[in-house]
Image: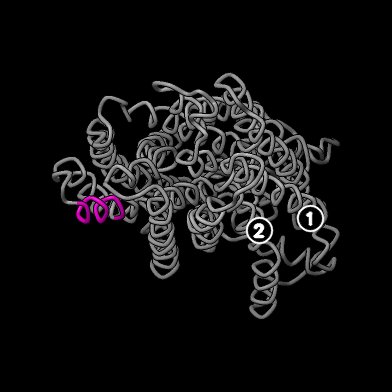
Amino acid sequence: MEKSSKTTTDSSSIHEGRQDDVDKAYEFAKQHQVELNQDDNKRILRKIDRNLLPLMIITYTLNFMDKNALSYSANFGLTTDNHLVGNQYSWASGSIFYLAYMVSQPFVARLIVRFPIGRFVAIATILWGAVLMTIAASRSFASLMAIRAILGCLESCINPAFIVISSQWWTREEQPLRISYWYLGNSIGQVCGGLLGYGIAHINGSIPNWAYFFLIFGAITIFYGGFLLYYLPDSPLNARWLSDEDRALAIERVRSNRTGVENHVWKWSQFKECITDIQCWILVATFFLDDIPAGGVGSFGSIVVKGFGFSTLYSTLLLVPLGVIQAICILFGGFMTRRFKNIRTWMIAGCQVPALIGAVLLYTLPRENQRGLLGSYYVVQTHGIVGTLTMSLVSSNFAGYTKKATAGAMMYVAFCVGQIVAPQLFLTNEAPAYKTAFLAAFVCFALCILFSIALRFYLIWENKRRDNMVLAEGEASSAGNEFLDLTDKQQKDVFRYVL
């Protein structure tokens, strides 16, 4: 059987001295053999949640606020002082940022495998904070484009890294809720960014008040990045807040994931397997379609709300409920996946329905219906669940360190393409209605429903095919190979996909 021969080959390679090819948790688990009981499992989970989740949530919050600082400052003189005309704001706010983000993804995937992931995230955070502060000195389209491109490269490190970190620390059943928690950074950033923006807009100093957005946000990020460098671990193997025994128990917790913990060897075979995996491409398409509407909110949120007829200051404040709605939806999705098994794909499809209705209303309601337009805009935000659930499927269903890093990078290439396309759909000559943008959102939500349902039935078919294979050929011995850095396709007799 394919699985048996593959496992034998990988196991024998360890005895031949190629131990760098296996997961680092393999040797650690051999040296620290422990028994994991229910009480220890709950205790270690509480420690991980208490020490790691807040770091991820705050990092993601700052990531969101910093990349959208341009949107907050757009109504306070930034476009005038930088002499932006036509669609130049669209390019500076979204397109160039996400173009750089996209181009960086292959390099980010390699760097995540090559370097300790905790230090990698911390250094990227410090650097993007420093670059953000330099926008305060920009006075031209060219300088703004250059700074935003560099910022996109640096901020692109966080999302793929967090997918890998989630699989290092939590079981497949725990991952959707934990990813929902750190993804809440988007919602918290929306709320905090709106409130801070409202306060910063009242600063009267010697520099333009839009510049304070970047100076204040950037300084906070640099300070926090220094703390991450000290406290964020690379994996359970070196967490300073765990004893050696607890580190072994943390590794034992995720043994059943069969997706690995840490490996610094880039494996081209896993890369090839990832880019030929149908599941990966369906998730990529879903993520892309979801991020076209999301990209519009990020770059044009305050401008769209102002176009409903609200004042500049009040439109900034009205962005706060967007974050609250996103938070409620994300938490709802996370708790539902914890309560019910294998409903992730149904949740992805279901959350698109109210969003689709909201997009239709934004396209059809008369401009005089101010409250109806604002309410519809809020309803569109229910699609925020898609990001957390698609990322949880990558974290849970892709085994092999290189394959998981590659899948994460592919997801965020799709994310970037969506974010690049989105601002270009907000045509200047259609302001403030932006009919093309909201028509595109309607189409994207409809296609997302189809792709998520197609993915569900593909995974059901694949799981049944594997069950039938085991019945026909018998199950090979798989004890002890959980940390051999095998992919999901190399573990067909024991690995089943979550839905």
Q: Position of residue 380 (x, y in %)?
A: 30, 50
With respect to residue 354, does 455 lie above or below? above
With respect to residue 471, does 403 lie above or below? above
Closer to us: 97 or 103: 97
Q: Position of residue 10 (x, y in %)?
A: 71, 38
With respect to residue 112, does 472 lie above or below? below
Q: Could you say which quadrant of the image residue 114 lies in?
A: top right
Q: Is residue 321 left or right of residue 229?
A: left
Q: Is residue 455 left or right of residue 260?
A: left
Quick one: SS at disc 2? helix
Q: Amino acid at mark 1?
A: Phe
Label at residue 169: 2
Q: Amino acid at mark 2?
A: Trp
Mark yes or no: residue 454 visible: yes
Q: Is residue 259 left or right of residue 231?
A: left
Residue at image coords 50%, 36%: 77
Residue under pointer 1: 227
**Sequence-first tag of 2 and 1:** 2
All told, the count of numbered labels is: 2
With respect to residue 195, does 429 lie above or below? above
Residue at image coords 39%, 60%: 321
Q: CA distance from mark 2 to mark 1?
A: 20 Å
User: In the image, which residues are magenta?
Assistant: 370-378
Q: Could you say which quadrant of the image residue 318 lies in?
A: bottom left
Label at residue 72: none
Closer to us: 207 or 187: 207
What is the chief secondary structure element of the magenta stretch? Answer: helix
Quick one: SS at disc 1? helix
Q: Position of residue 55 (x, y in %)?
A: 67, 59
| Label 2: few (<14), some (14–19) or many (≥20) C-alpha neighbours in 10 Å | many
